[in-house]
Amino acid sequence: MRPIFCMNLDFDARQSEIERLFKRYGRVDRVDIKSSFTFVYMEDDRDAEDAIRKLDRIDFGRKGRRL
């Protein structure tokens, strides 16, 4: 299981918001939030690849930042 690196998050992004976004593509094992970035760990590497393709550069958060 490799981490998915996500940057450009709002400083007040919540773990539940990120989990909800990624769990559409498979089971999320863990979310490690740092200041303006996070690592998302998914159970299946294929699901992680799907999430990366589908969520790359989408608007996320209250300020409409791009992942």
Image (cartoon, rainbow, N blue to C red):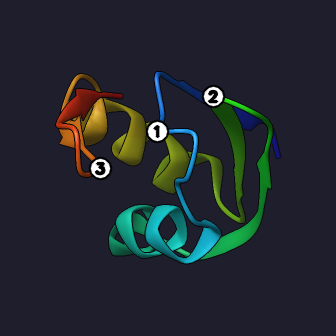
Residue 66: image quadrant is top left
Residue 23: image quadrant is bottom left
Would you say 32 lies left or right of 4 here?
right
Question: What amino acid type should be assigned to the residue bearing mark 2?
Answer: Ser
User: Is 54 situated above or below 46?
Assistant: above
Task: Please tell me which residue is depicted at 52% across the width and 54% down the height of the picture.
Answer: 13
Q: Which residue is mark 3?
A: 61
Question: What amino acid type should be assigned to the residue bearing mark 3?
Answer: Gly
Q: Do residues under tags 2 and 3 come within 8 Å of each other at their CB atoms?
A: no
Quadrant for the C terminus in the image: top left
Q: Nearer the viewer, residue 54 or 45?
A: 54
Would you say 49 lies left or right of 2 here?
left
Question: What amino acid type should be assigned to the residue bearing mark 1?
Answer: Asp
Q: Nearer the viewer, residue 35 or 39?
A: 35
10 Å neighbourhood of mark 2: few (<14), some, or many (≥20)?
few
Horizontal and vertical percent position of residue 19: 53, 70
- Alpha carbon distance from label 2 to label 3: 12 Å
On residue 46, the disc is none
Label 1 or label 2, whichever comes before in sequence order: 1
Q: Determine the secondary structure under disc 3.
A: loop
Task: Please tell me which residue is depicted at 57% across the width and 65% down the height of the picture.
Answer: 14
On residue 10, the disc is 1
Q: Which residue is mark 2?
A: 36
- Alpha carbon distance from label 1 to label 2: 6 Å
Task: Please tell me which residue is depicted at 53% across the width and 47% down the height of the picture.
Answer: 48
Q: Do residues under tags 1 and 2 come within 8 Å of each other at their CB atoms?
A: yes
Task: Please tell me which residue is depicted at 36% across the width and 45% down the height of the picture.
Answer: 50
Label 2 or label 3, whichever comes before in sequence order: 2
